Structure formats: structure tokens, C-alpha cells
Image (cartoon, grey):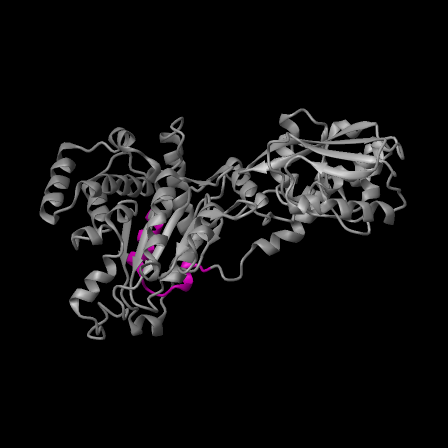
């Protein structure tokens, strides 16, 4: 008897259909075909043991299991469950009239329990696209996919739960309802709150840097922080993540899908609500940052930071290959990983905050503490190539905090009030850029800059004078216009003024130094 069970496979952040075909006929042996990897091949032993542990027999006949389409590699342990129910149905041990209506995925334990799998959110989306009635998934995975509220989801803990659903028995207790998902979200909401989130009010001094990071958050601009150890670069970066505007539903869905396929989904249920903040060590490999893997191609740090912040400390200490590999995702806002038989694309639209010391000893600009000769200082920052700096809009130089400021600790503006200004500025940008496929000023191309950053004759004359006097390159021109537009949005000004341009010019420190 031949039966078909609907499954799925994740390719990038999308899922594609996989049909598990099980045929039992005269003969002997169990055969698994369809370009399955080692984890899928091992599922036979897990499945046989699980079926026996819950009272089902393995027919003493020839069992052929085909994972279609046969020319696409299948990876992971999620095919355990469709193989198990396929054997039960094909051997006639139980009638499963609803077998062809659901996508069934899950890993089996030897005792018949069902364990979570990665990629639940794209699988739930696929169920709607291919016209399936819903999904049967492990409970944790079903909760992770509950943010995609268009799909009917059943969360199971054991093989018996799956058979109840597919046989048509009453199983309302297994349906992932809004009430059940809400209870999971309430319990997990606290886990999403990070104790190490910094507030601007906790950071003493550095008013210029705070203002620069506010501008960066408002326009989605990349930032380079340069300063000695202890100046607050890391604290300011973490505080910036908390003033970014809330994610739209589309952004939350896309980011949640990335974390889902990476096996890092929000297990509490629903979509991610906080913008991600990723802080890989500067010694991380190119594969860890871009993504990759020998068997399963997983998203890297640049994709896990999608719609959020990627913070890299001690950038000038990183290998040249790591520094330069950032250029492509910063420009394209996506990353493509190619292998011999596969090519995967992940989104990577992040706000980069990079931090570095001004010199090898770290104390240049801090009185006479620097011991580095001039040629070493120049060579240190020169590791940041022109093409990379071309993609970083704002350069901020941080000086050590004055001791008197640390002692007196005057009241500082908190992150909540800064975030309100950022949200309003982003709202203006969304209205202006509606239909352009972008959401903030930093994403504008040259044509959009000319369209949305028009200058009066007086401003144009002033900017020409500034560029000539400071020897700015052509690449700095568009950056200054974009930053000026963001500063104007923060002040709710429809036009760019000389004051906005003057402030924007102050954020191009490395251009003035000729780097």
C-alpha cells in the first residue's frame, strides 16, 4: 500500500514542500531514498524503536520510503514523524483519513515522544501557501510558529497525539489557540527582557556621542566609534539598541523566520518583538559572520542582526578578511552563501555599530598617555579601507569622561525620551519613502538622495564651501546629505538648513583626517 505524507524543507528563510512516500509490498528490508543525509538515514532506527515502544509493529515486508523531490538534499531529524505515520498508515495498522491534509514534521524520541525542530515558522507559512489545512508540529515549535496567525497549528508531545489528530478524533486540547499562545508569551516576555540593556541616563557624559547615535538610530546609519578604553563605546552601543523604533509586523516576521531556521526561535510563542542586538567577537570567522556550514547552511551574525544592530568591538584588531567581508552585506543588505550543490540567500539589513581604539595602545587623544609613534597610529586606523568607510555614515570620536562629571553625575536624558524622537523621525521617513521599498534615510540611493535631499541656494553654497575647505571626497557628499536629512527629520523640519548640514559635517571626522 502506498501513502503520501506532507513534509517540508527550509531553503534560506523559506520552506518548500517535501512529500514522504511510503510503500509496503512483498519482499524484505527497509529502504530510504531521496538524497537523505546521515541524520535522516538514522531516523529509520529511531522510528522503528519509537513505533515498537508505543505498541505498533514493523511489517515483515519490503518498505520503501522516498523523500520527493529526489534531486533535493534532505537534512535534519524532522522527517522522523512523517516516516512513522506513513509506516502506520501504509501497513494498515490504523486508519488516518486526515493524513493528506496536514504538514507533519517532528523528531521522535525512542519512547515515542516528539521533540522540537528548527524552521517551524517558514513551515507554517508554507502550509497556507500550498493549501494544507494546517500543521502538526512539536509543541515548542508550534508555539514558535504561532505568530503566523493565519495557520492552523497543532502542538503535540507524543506520537499518540499525532495519531489522534490524523485519525479525526477530538483533539481540541492540542490546537494552538490564542489563549494557549498568550500564556506562553506571558511566561517568555520576561526572558526577552535583557538585564544588561543600558539606558542613556546611566551613561555619564559623552553628550556628543549620544546625539550622534540618536541621529544614527533615527536614520538607520552605520556608525564608527573611536575612543580610548573606558570611554563608554560598548555601553553606548547597547543603549542605542534600546532607542530603535519597534519592528513592524513584516520586519518581525522576517527576523523571526531567520531565528527559526537557525534553531534560535522565540520558544515562548509568537514573533520576536525586540530588535536583535548581536555582538560577535572580532576574532569570529568569516563563516560565523556571513553564515555557512558543511551540512546545513545556517545564517550568520549579519543575518541574525537583520532589522537590528550588529556591534563589533575592537574592529581594527579583527583580521583584514573579516573587516572587508562586511562590505557586501552592508551594501546589498543580504548575503548569498554558495556551495557546490546549493546557493542560499539570507537577508542582512542591519545597523552596524563598530568600535575601535584610536591607536594600538588605545590612549591617543588622552593627554600624553599615548606611547605609539605617529606612523603606527596612522597604520592602525588605515586598516579600515576606503570602501568600508564609504559605507559608514557617522564617525564619532569619544574622549575620556571628565572625573568631575563622574563625581557630580548630573541627571541625564533617558532612553525613552530619545526613542520618542527617533520613532517620530522614522515615521516621517516612512511617509516620504513610501513605495520606494526602503524604510529609512540610510537606505536611499543616489537618485533618491537627489529627490529627497534638495538644498536651497544658500545651503548649496555653504556645502560646496565646506567640502572644498575640508577636502572631502565625493563619497562623503551623499553621506552628508543623508545625515542632514535625518537631522532635519529629528527636528521635524521639511527642509534641510545650514544648521543641519553643519552638524552632519561634524560626523565625518575620518574624512577630515584624510582616511
Relative placement, left or right, of 39 versus 331 is right
Q: Quadrant of the N terminus?
A: top right
Is residue 242 something one can see in this rendering? no
Task: Report the magenta residues as a range.
Answer: 198-215
Relative placement, left or right, of 497 versus 308 is left
The vertical placement of 224 against 344, above or below, is below
Relative placement, left or right, of 227 versus 62 is left
Q: Quadrant of residue 348?
A: top left
Q: Quadrant of residue 462?
A: top left
Residue 1 falls inside the magenta stretch: no
Residue 382 x, y percent position in the rendering: 23, 57
The vertical placement of 505 against 206, above or below, is above
- Frontmost residue, 118 versus 79: 79
Is residue 445 something one can see in this rendering? yes
Residue 202 falls inside the magenta stretch: yes
- Frontmost residue, 98 versus 403: 98
**Residue at image x 21%, y 61%?**
379
Amino acid at each position: 500500500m502506498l501513502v503520501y505524507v506532507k513534509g517540508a524543507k527550509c531553503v534560506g528563510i523559506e520552506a518548500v514542500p517535501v512529500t514522504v512516500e511510503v510503500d509496503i509490498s512483498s519482499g524484505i528490508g527497509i529502504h530510504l531514498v531521496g538524497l537523505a543525509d546521515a541524520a535522516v538515514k538514522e531516523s529509520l532506527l529511531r522510528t522503528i524503536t519509537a513505533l515498537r515502544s508505543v505498541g505498533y509493529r514493523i511489517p515483515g515486508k519490503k518498505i520503501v520510503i522516498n523523500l520527493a523531490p529526489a534531486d533535493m538534499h534532505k537534512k535534519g531529524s524532522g522527517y522522523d514523524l512523517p516516516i512513522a505515520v506513513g509506516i502506520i498508515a501504509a501497513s494498515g495498522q490504523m486508519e488516518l483519513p486526515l493524513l493528506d491534509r496536514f504538514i507533519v514534521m517532528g523528531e521522535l524520541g525512542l519512547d515515542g515522544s516528539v521533540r522540537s525542530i528548527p524552521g517551524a515558522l517558514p513551515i507554517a507559512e508554507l502550509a497556507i501557501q500550498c493549501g494544507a489545512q494546517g500543521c502538526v508540529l512539536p509543541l515548542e515549535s508550534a508555539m514558535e510558529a504561532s505568530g503566523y496567525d493565519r495557520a492552523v497549528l497543532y502542538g503535540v508531545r507524543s506520537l499518540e497525539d499525532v495519531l489522534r489528530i490524523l485519525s479525526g478524533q477530538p483533539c481540541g486540547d492540542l490546537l494552538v489557540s490564542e489563549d494557549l499562545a498568550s500564556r506562553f508569551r506571558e511566561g517568555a516576555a520576561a526572558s526577552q527582557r535583557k538585564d544588561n540593556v543600558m539606558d542613556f541616563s546611566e551613561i555619564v557624559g559623552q553628550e556628543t556621542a549620544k546625539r550622534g547615535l540618536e541621529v544614527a538610530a533615527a536614520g538607520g546609519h552605520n556608525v564608527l566609534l573611536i575612543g580610548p578604553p573606558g570611554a563608554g563605546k560598548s555601553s553606548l552601543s547597547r543603549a542605542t539598541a534600546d532607542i530603535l523604533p519597534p519592528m513592524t509586523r513584516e520586519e518581525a516576521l522576517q527576523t523571526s523566520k531567520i531565528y527559526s531556521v537557525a534553531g534560535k526561535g522565540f520558544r515562548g510563542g509568537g514573533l520576536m518583538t525586540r530588535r536583535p542586538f548581536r555582538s560577535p567577537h572580532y576574532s569570529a570567522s568569516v563563516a560565523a559572520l556571513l553564515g555557512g556550514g558543511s551540512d546545513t547552511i545556517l545564517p550568520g551574525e549579519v543575518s541574525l542582526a537583520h532589522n537590528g544592530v550588529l556591534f563589533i568591538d575592537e574592529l581594527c584588531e579583527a583580521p583584514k578578511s573579516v573587516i572587508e567581508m562586511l562590505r557586501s552585506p552592508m551594501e546589498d543588505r543580504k548575503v548569498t552563501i554558495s556551495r557546490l550543490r546549493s546557493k542560499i540567500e539570507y537577508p542582512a539589513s542591519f545597523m552596524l555599530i563598530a568600535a575601535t581604539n584610536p591607536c594600538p595602545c588605545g590612549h591617543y587623544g588622552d593627554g600624553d598617555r599615548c606611547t605609539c609613534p605617529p606612523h603606527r597610529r596612522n597604520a592602525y586606523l588605515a586598516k579600515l579601507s576606503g570602501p568600508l568607510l564609504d559605507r559608514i555614515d557617522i564617525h564619532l570620536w569619544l574622549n575620556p569622561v571628565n572625573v568631575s562629571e563622574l563625581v557630580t553625575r548630573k541627571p541625564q536624558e533617558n532612553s525613552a525620551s530619545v526613542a520618542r524622537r527617533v520613532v517620530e523621525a522614522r515615521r516621517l521617513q516612512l511617509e516620504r519613502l513610501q513605495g520606494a521599498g526602503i524604510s529609512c534615510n540610510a537606505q536611499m540611493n543616489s537618485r533618491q538622495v537627489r529627490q529627497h535631499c534638495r538644498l536651497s541656494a544658500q545651503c548649496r553654497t555653504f556645502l560646496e564651501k565646506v567640502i572644498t575647505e575640508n577636502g572631502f571626497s565625493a563619497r562623503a557628499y551623499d553621506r552628508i546629505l543623508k545625515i542632514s536629512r535625518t537631522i532635519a527629520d529629528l527636528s521635524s523640519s521639511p527642509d534641510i538648513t545650514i544648521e543641519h548640514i553643519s552638524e552632519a559635517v561634524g560626523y565625518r571626522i575620518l574624512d577630515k583626517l584624510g582616511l
